[in-house]
Image (tube, rainbow, N blue to C red):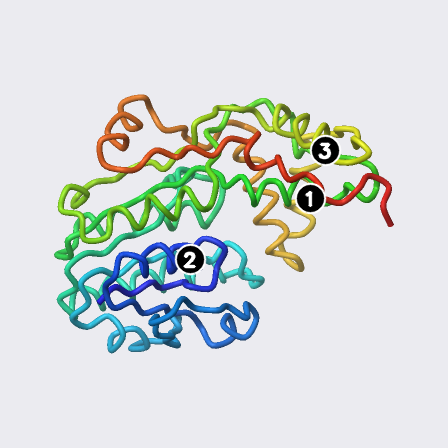
């Protein structure tokens, strides 16, 4: 049995599809409120399970005896100030301990290439801490570290297209090996039950290293009306995190994430890490040109 925890997210739902295609019994698990919000349609034969990592004992019956548990859950979009800690740190720790008690054959933990003990973003610090705890645990493990998702950053950059602009947070000069969500899901599914992936920490990166500015220019050219590219100064971003930390913690957390990328505080995968991943994972082939080809689905500049 393979269990995917965090099955209703943009990545998790794709992972469910990919893992189900492997043919083994598959269970898709998320909080009841997330099932209601997502209206997800599960592949044939996949069982739904309700789980809440913030509640002691919630996950133990789910993972007991599982061949593989895939953790795609994250708390970076939780709206409360301590939401990331409750999910990314305490919740992931509950899942790890349940895997230990339940004799799970493999834990596949989906972290992020941004994870780091000194990160200015709480979610990224918690991810790094959980990585260390997984490595020190008794559970056979695989850790995957996707870079930034193309689809997520398309949404970030095009929020103000109806106002006639593509908005770049900061200077936009840091090169990033963006990855498509489906490419990441394919990589995750490829390590399920794969002995060659055990005990490995692997980056999941796309084929192109482009700056946010370069991506914004491509988005502008591919969007009807060709909205102009505008920048939010780094100083204004820092002010926004301070002003919104108390009453809009989710917004403040997201701004800190953009600052981390813009300031190159996000560590890029090294050539050696990428070479190691290439020996285990299928190549991520989706380029920005591929993603932007069906341009008619995006808003038009100045559209109300």
For the N terminus, give its image quadrant.
bottom left
Q: Which residue is mark 3?
A: 232
Q: Nearer the viewer, residue 64 or 12?
A: 12
Residue 11 higher or lower than 120, as above or below:
below
Which residue: 66% across, 34% down?
169
Local crowd size for mark 2, using a 10 Å CA cut-off: few (<14), some (14–19), many (≥20) = many
Horizontal and vertical percent position of residue 227: 79, 32
For the residue labelled by badge 1, is the local secondary structure a helix, a strand or a loop?
helix
Separation of residues labelled 2 and 1 (CA atoms): 30 Å
Local crowd size for mark 3, using a 10 Å CA cut-off: few (<14), some (14–19), many (≥20) = few
Horizontal and vertical percent position of residue 60: 25, 74
- Identify the image quadrant of residue 277: top left
Q: Nearer the viewer, residue 263 or 272?
A: 272
Which residue: 40% across, 59% down?
73
Residue 28 higher or lower than 225, as above or below:
below
Local crowd size for mark 1, using a 10 Å CA cut-off: few (<14), some (14–19), many (≥20) = some
Among numbered discs 2 and 3, the one appearing first in the sequence: 2
- Identify the image quadrant of residue 283: top left
Which residue: 15% across, 41% down?
196
Horizontal and vertical percent position of residue 278: 27, 30
Q: Which residue is mark 1?
A: 240
- Tell me if 267 is positioned left or right of 248 in this view: left
Closer to the eye: label 2 or 3: 2
- Tell me if 252 is positioned left or right of 267 in this view: right
Which residue: 57% across, 49% down?
253
Q: Which residue is mark 2?
A: 12
Separation of residues labelled 1 and 3 (CA atoms): 11 Å
Q: Nearer the viewer, residue 230 or 20?
A: 20
């Amino acid at each position: 049995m393979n269990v995917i925890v965090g099955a209703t997210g943009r990545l998790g739902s794709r992972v469910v599809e990919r893992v189900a295609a492997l043919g083994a019994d598959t269970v898709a698990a998320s909080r009841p409120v997330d099932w209601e919000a997502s209206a997800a349609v599960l592949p044939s034969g996949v069982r739904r399970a309700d789980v809440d990592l913030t509640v002691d004992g919630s996950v133990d019956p789910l993972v007991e005896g599982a061949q593989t548990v895939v953790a795609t859950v994250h708390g970076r979009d939780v709206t409360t100030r301590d939401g990331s800690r409750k999910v990314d740190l305490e919740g992931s720790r509950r899942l790890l301990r349940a895997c230990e008690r339940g004799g799970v054959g493999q834990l596949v933990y989906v972290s992020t290439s941004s994870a780091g003990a000194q990160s200015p973003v709480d979610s990224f610090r918690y991810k790094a801490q959980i990585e260390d705890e997984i490595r020190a645990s008794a559970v056979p493990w695989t850790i995957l570290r996707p870079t930034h998702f193309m689809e997520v950053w398309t949404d970030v950059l095009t929020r103000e297209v109806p106002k006639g602009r593509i908005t770049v947070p900061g200077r936009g000069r840091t090169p990033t090996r963006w990855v498509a969500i489906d490419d990441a899901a394919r990589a995750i599914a490829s390590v399920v039950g794969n002995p060659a992936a055990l005990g490995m920490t692997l980056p999941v990166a796309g084929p192109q290293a482009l700056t946010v500015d370069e991506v914004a220019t491509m988005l502008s050219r591919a969007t009807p009306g060709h909205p102009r590219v505008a920048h939010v100064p780094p100083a204004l971003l820092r002010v926004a995190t301070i002003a919104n930390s108390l009453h809009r913690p989710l917004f403040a957390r997201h701004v800190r994430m953009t600052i981390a990328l813009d300031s190159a505080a996000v560590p890029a995968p090294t050539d050696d890490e990428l070479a190691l991943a290439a020996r285990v994972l299928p190549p991520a082939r989706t380029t920005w040109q591929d993603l932007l080809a069906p341009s008619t689905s995006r808003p038009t500049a100045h559209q109300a």
